[in-house]
């Protein structure tokens, strides 16, 4: 049996093992070279020694008790192991965490933040020349070495940060484990390792801050470098402009620092580490960790990407460089000051004098060239060894002020001198004189004038490089925004690279600079903001942003971040931000409300809610208990085919009676798709959440921009541009013809200047007069732009109009304000503002007798453009009005055949469906494709993202599908999506209802009359769900004329619709045309290209005119396919082949004197194909001229909405009421070869 001594020894060994385990645990936390892997090696060794010793003790016992000894041996081994791990766990629980799991550790050895323009020049001329440069490293920055490279960096991937640190410390660099990587880049896109992850709200890891998964993707970077030969002496530092989410930096094997915040610079002193190299060869290594406690603060609605995403610099600070930082203040009244922070070196500081000069240098190009200006300010201050903060201030007489409209900048040069007057250091920055304030009446002002924020939220996003931006991309983004009348950017939801702000300074763009903070996925949202443990992490991200960016004139507001709740952390951060810069207001939307956010907390100077409907926006801006401006930080969600109702917001923003409502920021600029190739189809497409195997994702919610990922515009861009234009035109009078018939009509316009600071001298007015008779203008011209303009419409003289091949019946005046000169962001002639007016020509005075006689009264009847007795250009009928028209029944094919002269079965109607299946032109061409149910009633559409948006989508995040239906049955489904109700009402595009004919009656009695020339067919039909059940009833009348014209009349009774259904998707007829009829000409709203797309709630920019297009050009290739390409307000649309034969669709009114129109779309893809596709590569391969053309002729079509994409957001005015009865009609007129659709659109129908 074991003795008491043996028990004592066992206890001793158990405790020893446990204590050693604790020691190793602690050691692994504090020593960077000891990883968890090596930790377990130590544990195994200690446990083996322990168990061996236990076994030796028991071997000394009597063999007679061997069985009991074995049992005791096992039990004591078990106790020893348990004791070991219990004490080890206690040690872990009560000791500091890893840096990347410790919110109180945001950095190690990181130097204080400073102005981004600090370049440590040694001459004032270099500093002055550098000020106008956009790149931070140029020929003038002789003490900065850019370490970016496409080839010099090597990369190794691991999933254990501790192991990565050990490999750096242990110098275990197996070349086979490394690959080349470009820096800057995101390793998920530039190497074969790891994957991009997209989420909107949810974290892609457990939301248990600050703890993270043990499997944590980590990148090990390595780069060799040498110092430039000209660099002698001084201090050295490494500057990372952005990497993350957390990283350690090593130089020559020694740790130089650690930092978090992937979107702000971190600088580390490397002077001592560089001295260690005897050969002059140096190695920079970076261990970059994907997930850190900082990731809990970076839950932005964007891709989770990591790596060294921004530039890396090596900086030399020559001897005597004592300036640590400097900042400038310049207001609209000319007050100017520069605050210089000097290093605390005591008697070792060489600086004895600081000089500040301000030059009126005018930058002349994006390349940095500038015209030297006069010195407008000079100031200096002597410095003693004890002073650290020196302020040099003064006054500039009548400075040119900076605004987004007038981005006037000056160059400030700060120099330090030693006691002998030698220049030690020179720094520079561009300065804009401006004052930003909120008045006592709650109006946001720049330079004492109210501004209207025409803003957009902009993510750093490139389809190939992710979060890594170039100056070219920044320039492209800012340029297209200015070209489309945007004047403000919110840097959602993190600071951008310095080059971005320099471009905004120069080109003119208001910037809301937002801190890299969002905790949207945390529940409650303010959990971290209310935890004092996170105070330092919150505060640093906000104050360091301001310290870097405060010298930029473009920044008009600061933002504390986005959707992070409220709490002590943000309260403290706001106070610290205000202490750094009291000159700019702070705006912050906390996300306090579940859907809209409040934007009204004590943390914000500006009421900045998210996605409030127009009515709520109006309420916020007119409340008597508020004295803060209203600027929507996010509104009109641009997800796919969206941005309806935008005109209603801008009616509010421009309303001068509501001065506190001052605009907002569209969400957002660019679809955040990543370029990818589908492995099956080999088609290129824009990838979104889930397309990289990321299991936790929010699918296409990142696809919500006004521009596609490659910066091609969505059609909604044109709507934004028109509504935000800084000029308003009003028609003052109708076009009046004075004097003889050869006189040009005159029309007067009122012009309202909506610029806050600019006059109209940089613009001129151009105009065209267009008509329904041709796509060529009747008149063009230009005039000086002023508050009141009178135009003489040359080319519209009565004597000219009566001689036109076709007389116009509708005439439009189109005016534009265009740039007189080329600028850095626009070409000469670039359109800033447009308007269209349908004009009426009137005559005052006598008309020349010859013109009067030839006009046959046309001029005196020219009301709304109608010319009675006008020329018809030798119009001929579509076919022969005397042709023989007969009807016969085909019992085998269950159809009625209508024969016109020799064209057998010129029109065929299917008896089973009531659909028109054949329509032949006078030249014998069947315009309809050979598809079943060709012309039939259509009440479906391929759902848009907004159609899918509803409360059930929000519940899908937290509830199973069955539970969603239960909740809906209990609480109601009013807020459920339109698509949800369509599916339950039998209107889903994926299982569209089919048309069934109940009865058909053919009436040829009209042919028996002497003047009769048609046969009428009445089809009583129903739309039946796929699973059975009638959706609606419809009577369709086909009136078929001898000349081939067909009048289609429909009466619809949707009596069986679900009561919950708020709107039909559309109401009209669909048809499939022969593939050859791809040449489309129409009179209606829009344009020929994709930008011509318009819907009832998004058509302000859709001017009337005659346009030519094709199905391919009309198709808008949205990242997620769906309803697209509609053209509204159409009088007619013609579909012809290359010889001009085809089909003309004409609007028809059921009431005399009532004007009617229709909306139409034409696509190579059917509604079902669009509905089934989740990506563009899901659409079948189609060729124009080879495949049928699917056409929708819509009497009504539901709007697209746009206030948000997660609740039904189409306003009542734009719904298609499913409870109403509808009647509509249109004409189908076959076109013979060579017949003009313009002429045929004007001839009387049916004869």
Image (cartoon, rainbow, N blue to C red):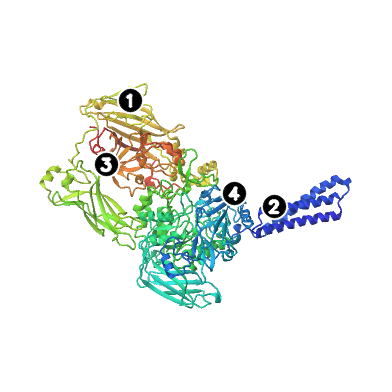
| Circles 2, 4 touching at the beta carbon (< 8 Å) | no
Q: Earlier in the sequence, mark 2 or mark 4?
A: 2
- Residue 759, horizontal then vertical, whole percent: 30, 62
Q: Calculate the distance from the C-alpha at mark 4 to the C-alpha at mark 3.
A: 79 Å
Rendered location of residue 46, percent (x, y): 75, 54
Task: Give the residue displayed 21% in from the left and 34% down from the top.
Answer: 876
Q: Is disc 3 placed on a helix, strand or loop? A: loop
Residue at the disc numbered 1: 896
Label 4, label 1: how far apart the Cα atoms are = 77 Å
- Horizontal side of 140 relative to 58 (left or right) equals left
CB within 8 Å, label 4 to label 1: no
Q: Which residue is mark 4?
A: 176
> Is residue 395 shown to the viewer in this render?
no
Labels 2 and 3: the sequence-earlier one: 2
Q: Residue at x 14, y 52 (%)?
A: 739
State the residue position of label 3: 1154
């Amino acid at each position: 049996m074991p003795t008491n001594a043996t028990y004592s020894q066992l206890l001793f060994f158990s405790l020893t093992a446990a204590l050693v385990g604790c020691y190793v645990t602690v050691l692994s936390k504090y020593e960077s070279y000891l990883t968890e892997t090596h930790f377990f090696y130590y544990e195994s060794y200690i446990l083996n020694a322990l168990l061996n010793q236990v076994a030796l003790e028991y071997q000394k016992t009597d063999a007679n008790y061997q069985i009991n000894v074995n049992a005791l041996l096992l039990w004591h081994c078990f106790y020893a192991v348990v004791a070991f791990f219990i004490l080890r766990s206690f040690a872990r629980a009560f000791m500091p965490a890893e840096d990347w799991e410790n919110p109180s550790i945001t950095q190690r050895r990181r130097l204080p933040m400073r102005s981004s323009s600090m370049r440590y020049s040694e001459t004032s001329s270099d500093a002055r020349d550098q000020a106008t440069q956009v790149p931070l490293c140029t020929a003038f920055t002789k003490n900065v070495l850019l370490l970016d490279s496409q080839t010099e960096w090597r990369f190794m991937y691991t999933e254990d940060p501790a192991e990565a640190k050990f490999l750096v410390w242990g110098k275990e660099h197996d070349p086979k484990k490394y690959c080349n990587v470009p820096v800057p880049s995101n390793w998920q896109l530039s190497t074969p390792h790891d994957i991009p992850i997209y989420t909107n709200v949810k974290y892609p890891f457990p939301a248990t801050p600050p703890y993270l998964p043990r499997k944590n993707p980590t990148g090990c970077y390595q780069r060799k470098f040498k110092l430039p030969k000209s660099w002698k002496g001084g201090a050295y530092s490494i500057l990372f402009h952005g990497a993350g989410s957390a990283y350690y930096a090593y130089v020559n094997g020694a740790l130089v620092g650690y930092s978090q915040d992937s979107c702000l610079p971190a600088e580390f002193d490397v002077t001592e580490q560089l001295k260690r190299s005897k050969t002059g060869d140096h190695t920079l290594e970076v261990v970059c960790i994907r997930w850190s406690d900082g990731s809990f603060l970076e839950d932005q609605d964007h891709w989770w990407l990591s790596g060294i995403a921004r530039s890396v610099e090596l900086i030399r600070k020559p001897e005597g460089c004592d300036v640590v930082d400097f900042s400038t203040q310049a207001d609209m009244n000319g007050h100017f000051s520069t605050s210089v922070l000097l290093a605390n070196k005591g008697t070792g500081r060489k600086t004895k004098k600081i000089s500040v000069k301000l030059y009126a240098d005018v930058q002349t190009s994006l390349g940095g060239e500038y015209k030297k200006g006069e010195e407008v300010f000079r100031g200096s201050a002597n410095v003693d060894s004890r002073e650290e903060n020196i302020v040099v201030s003064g006054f500039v007489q009548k400075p040119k002020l900076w605004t987004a409209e007038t981005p006037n900048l000056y160059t400030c040069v700060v120099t330090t001198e030693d006691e002998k007057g030698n220049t030690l250091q020179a720094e520079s920055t561009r300065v804009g004189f401006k004052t930003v304030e909120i008045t006592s009446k709650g109006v946001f002002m720049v330079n004492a004038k109210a501004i209207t924020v025409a803003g957009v939220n902009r993510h750093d996003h490139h389809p190939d490089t992710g979060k890594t931006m170039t100056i070219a991309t920044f320039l492209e983004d800012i340029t297209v925004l200015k070209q489309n009348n945007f004047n403000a950017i919110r840097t959602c939801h993190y600071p951008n690279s310095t080059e971005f702000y320099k471009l905004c300074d120069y080109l003119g763009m208001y910037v809301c600079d937002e801190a890299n903070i969002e905790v949207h996925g945390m529940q409650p949202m303010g959990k971290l903001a209310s935890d004092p443990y996170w105070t330092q992490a919150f505060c640093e991200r906000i104050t360091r942003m301001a310290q870097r960016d405060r010298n930029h004139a473009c920044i008009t507001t600061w933002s504390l971040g986005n959707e992070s709740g409220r709490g002590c952390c943000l309260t403290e951060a706001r106070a610290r931000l205000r202490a750094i810069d009291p000159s700019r207001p702070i705006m912050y939307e906390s996300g306090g409300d579940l859907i809209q956010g409040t934007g009204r907390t004590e943390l914000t100077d500006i009421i900045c809610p998210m996605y409030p409907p127009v009515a709520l926006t109006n309420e916020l801006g007119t409340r008597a208990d508020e004295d803060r401006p209203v600027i929507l930080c996010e509104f009109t969600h641009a997800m796919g085919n969206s941005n309806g109702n935008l005109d209603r917001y801008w009616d509010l923003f421009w309303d001068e009676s509501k001065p506190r409502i001052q605009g907002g920021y569209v969400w957002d600029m660019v679809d955040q798709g990543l370029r990818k190739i589908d492995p099956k189809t080999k088609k290129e497409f824009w990838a979104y959440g889930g397309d990289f195997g990321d299991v936790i994702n929010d699918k296409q919610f990142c696809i919500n921009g006004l521009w596609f990922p490659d910066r091609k515009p969505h059609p909604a861009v044109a709507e934004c541009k028109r509504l935000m234009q800084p000029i308003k035109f009003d028609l003052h009078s109708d076009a009046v013809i004075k004097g003889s018939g050869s006189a040009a009509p005159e029309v007067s316009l009122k012009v309202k200047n909506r610029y806050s600071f600019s006059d109209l001298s940089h613009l001129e007015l151009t105009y065209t007069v267009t008509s329904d008779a041709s796509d060529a203008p009747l008149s063009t011209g230009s005039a000086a732009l002023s508050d009141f303009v009178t135009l003489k419409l040359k080319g519209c003289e009565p004597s000219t109009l009566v001689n036109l091949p076709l007389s116009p019946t509708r005439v439009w005046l189109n005016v534009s304000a265009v740039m007189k000169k080329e600028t850095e962001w626009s070409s000469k002639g670039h359109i800033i503002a447009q308007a269209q007016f349908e004009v009426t020509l009137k005559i005052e005075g006598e008309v020349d007798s010859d013109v009067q006689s030839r006009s046959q009264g046309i001029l005196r009847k020219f009301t709304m453009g109608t010319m009675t007795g006008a020329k018809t250009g030798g119009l001929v009928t579509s076919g022969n009005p005397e042709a023989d028209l007969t009807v016969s029944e085909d019992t085998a094919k269950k159809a009625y055949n209508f024969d016109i002269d020799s064209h057998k079965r010129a029109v065929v109607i299917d008896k089973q469906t009531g659909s028109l299946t054949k329509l032949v032109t006078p030249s014998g061409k069947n315009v309809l494709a050979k598809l079943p149910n060709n012309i039939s009633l259509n009440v479906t559409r391929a759902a848009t993202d907004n159609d899918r948006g509803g409360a059930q989508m929000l519940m899908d995040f937290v509830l199973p599908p069955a539970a969603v239906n239960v909740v809906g049955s209990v609480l109601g489904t009013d807020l459920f999506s339109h698509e949800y109700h369509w599916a339950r009402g039998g209107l889903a595009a994926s299982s569209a209802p089919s048309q069934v004919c109940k009865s058909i009656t053919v009436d040829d009695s009209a042919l028996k009359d002497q003047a009769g020339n048609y046969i009428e067919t009445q089809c009583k039909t129903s739309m039946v769900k796929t699973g059975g059940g009638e959706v609606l009833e419809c009577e369709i009348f086909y009136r078929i004329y001898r000349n081939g014209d067909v009048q289609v009349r429909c009466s619809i009774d949707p009596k069986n619709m679900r009561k919950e259904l708020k709107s039909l998707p559309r109401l009209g007829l669909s048809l499939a045309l022969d593939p050859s009829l791809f040449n489309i000409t129409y009179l209606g709203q829009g344009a020929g290209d994709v930008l011509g797309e318009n819907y009832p709630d998004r058509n302000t920019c859709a001017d009337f005119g005659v346009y030519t297009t094709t199905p391919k050009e009309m198709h808008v290739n949205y990242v997620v396919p769906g309803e697209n390409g509609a053209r509204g307000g159409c009088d007619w649309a013609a579909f012809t082949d290359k010889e001009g034969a085809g089909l003309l669709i004409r609007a028809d009114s059921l009431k005399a004197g009532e004007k009617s129109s229709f909306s139409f779309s034409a696509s190579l893809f059917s509604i079902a194909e669009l509905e089934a596709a989740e990506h563009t590569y899901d659409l079948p391969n189609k060729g124009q001229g080879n495949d049928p053309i699917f056409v929708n002729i819509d009497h009504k079509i539901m709007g697209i909405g746009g206030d948000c994409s997660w609740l039904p957001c189409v306003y009542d005015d734009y719904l298609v009421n499913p409870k109403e009865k509808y009647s509509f009609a249109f004409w189908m007129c076959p076109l013979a070869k060579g017949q003009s659709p313009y002429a045929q659109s004007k001839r009387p129908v049916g004869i």
